[in-house]
Amino acid sequence: MMKRIYTLLLLCILSSGFAQEASGPYLSVTTADAAIPLKISSSEVQISGTIAHVRITQVYQNLGNRPIEAKYVFPLSTKAAVHKMQMTIGDRIVNAKIFERQEAQKVYSNALEQGKRAAKLDQDRPNVFQMNVGNIMPNDEITIDVYYTEMLVPVNGEYQFVAPAVVGPRFIGESTKNEESFNMPFTKKGVADTFHFDITVTLNAGMIIQNIGCSSHKVNVNYPDAKTAEVFLSKSNENPANRDFILNYNLRGSSIQSGLLLYEHEDENFFAFQMEPTNKVSLEEIPAREYLFIVDVSGSMNGYPLEVSKELMRNLLCDLRPTDSFNVQLFASSSTIFSPIPLETNGQNIEAAIRFLSEGQGGGGTQLLNALNNAYNLARKDRSSARSMVVITDGYVSVEKEAFELIRNNLDQANVFTFGIGSSVNRYLIEGMAKVANSESFVATTMSEAQEVAKKFKKYIATPLLTQVKIEAKGFDVYDIAPNSIPDIFAARPLTVYGKYHGRPEGKLIVTGYQGKKAFHQEYKISRGHLSRANKALRYLWARKKIAELDDYQKLFNNKVKDSIITLGLKYNLATAYTSFVAVDEAIMNEEGALKTIKQPLPLPKHVNNSAVGAAAEVNGKTNFKKTFKISFNITLSKSKERYFTMAFKAIYSKLVDRCLDQYEQVRIQFNAKGQIIRVEKMENERWVYDNALTNEFITHSNKQMNLPRELIVILRK
């Protein structure tokens, strides 16, 4: 009853837009004397070649006067192989042991009942983990270290390391499960981090490092030598814990080199093979395509994320060809469609679609499954058209596997591409939807990235994939290959295969397939591989890949599969959905056994409004559009640039221009080469007259500059 009253009071306080389902996350009011158990969360990253080794250190404290249990939900990479955990109390180090999940809970609960300090790590999603630390005594500080490793796979020649920082609020309205990890408190937007956050990265690339940069945080970079870089967070970062840490870098060389890593461990030998196809071809004719853009306008997308979505849509639509057709679907707690049937790609239709999106109000829960079902049932322009669905969302839902299953059951209906929008998107959903569709995923955290990922999408759909891929070993005795079937290889994304082998590392690997209409064949000599004890991570990476095949993207499975995952987790010391780490300190500290449980408040992800947490609402019905003003130019622009300028200009200045054209027959605006407005004139008595007040009004109306090739004059008329 009290929770209902609190929720009602919270809804009265929230004033910005609509919101997500209240039965999941909730806002936390923090005060100066609040009992916040997490003191520090820091990460130390060592990247050697293409493998990242990460140690996450969490320090928990008890500033109160009674024993507590701390619960903290945090994200990791979707590809992380979590293989070790330690608990440190004073000068004592306790190595955690891996147990089947139910047994782990028993071991942890028994330790707490006996008054012992204990910690337990559970995986709730491949990218969502929960840490429980119990019997933290008054004035105690307990340090937990979690170790994981992952393989970095370059795209278009660029490497990216992502350290997820915060689990965003999840809409649970379409889920039948009551998951504790998604019922966590969030601090209000703008509240300072409640714990110290830090990350350092040491990059030993083995090749000369180029173009290193961090799009998410301000960083300082030291270069001990040309092949090594040390990256530190700048102290000038504000609230660094409220967004993913994203580091990008290139290595000297125009393409990714094929590589084979080898590791021999007792009775098992492991390998990892990475290769990028080098024979690039272009299709002479690309058939006409039909695109359905499915845009999330739920509460968590309200404000800046929705503005990024609009920028992305402007770029995507401008890059469509005249032979393509398109439609737009907005969704939150319900869905609304721009047009009953797909429309031609022309300036008028694109402009109307952007206005449709611009007038879509961010609010409500994220009914993703309902939106996908509606999308699959929409009419096509014609039966022979090839449909591609482009889903644009932050992914703040808890029905990932249900979405994967829905897409997998409709692979013959449409291709599915995904665009993650935001500073801390649910990469498990964004990457997983694309994975089961054999397509590609993209993430945009800012306006500028929205432009860049649109370019990448255009390049991707214009480049033929390597299909019907097969890998054959000759003179190299391999087994337990993962993945067991190789999907189509995306443009400029290398093929990565893990496996085991018997005997000596000799012979060769042969990769075959088709790229466009041309047969592909490439060979790699095993003798060129790198055999080293330093490649120990291959054990964990192989096992993690096998677990991903069995569980990550599968909804329906039997106990045999579950037993296989448990066996892999226990044998290779990995946290999985069915195995957990537990560390127990044998000293009895809390003889009475009473505990106060505190859920660690999570920072609200950057740019996400308080309306992401609360009640649900629906998307308004379809908007009717009136014709807007016309724009003509003094120079000739390409069709794509003309489209983009027209849509961007109208998105920014429509209301102001409409008001001006109610008074004047025509208005003329001059832009300089930087895209800044420098002069506005009005038509009076068939003469152009400079208007200083109108010029200042346009200049002060928006600080956004138009992207122009050179100086430009536009004439506006009804």
Image (cartoon, helix red, strand yellow):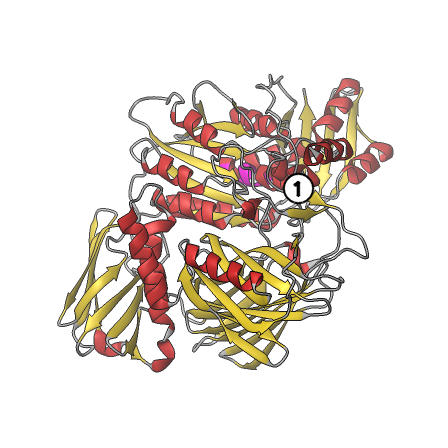
The magenta region covers 311-316
Residue at the left extreme, as displayed: 475
Front one among 325 and 708: 325
Q: Is residue 281 above or below residue 143?
A: above
Front one among 703 and 295: 295
- Residue shown at the point (58%, 19%) measured from the top left: 621
Which image quarter holds the C terminus? top right
Question: The disc labelled 1 sits on which kind of residue?
Answer: Tyr
Q: Position of residue 54 (x, y in %)?
A: 50, 69
For residue 152, say whether it is visible.
no
The overriding secondary structure of the stretch rendered in magenta is: helix
On the rendered structure, is 439 left or right of 658? left
Q: Is residue 189 above or below residue 644?
A: below
On the rendered structure, is 123 left or right of 522? right
**Residue 313 painted magenta:** yes
Front one among 229 and 676: 229
For residue 288, say whether it is visible.
yes
Residue at the front extreme, as displayed: 592
On the rendered structure, is 38 left or right of 370? right
- Residue shown at the point (44%, 45%) measured from the top left: 457
Q: Position of residue 282 (x, y in %)?
A: 31, 48
Residue tagged 1: 26
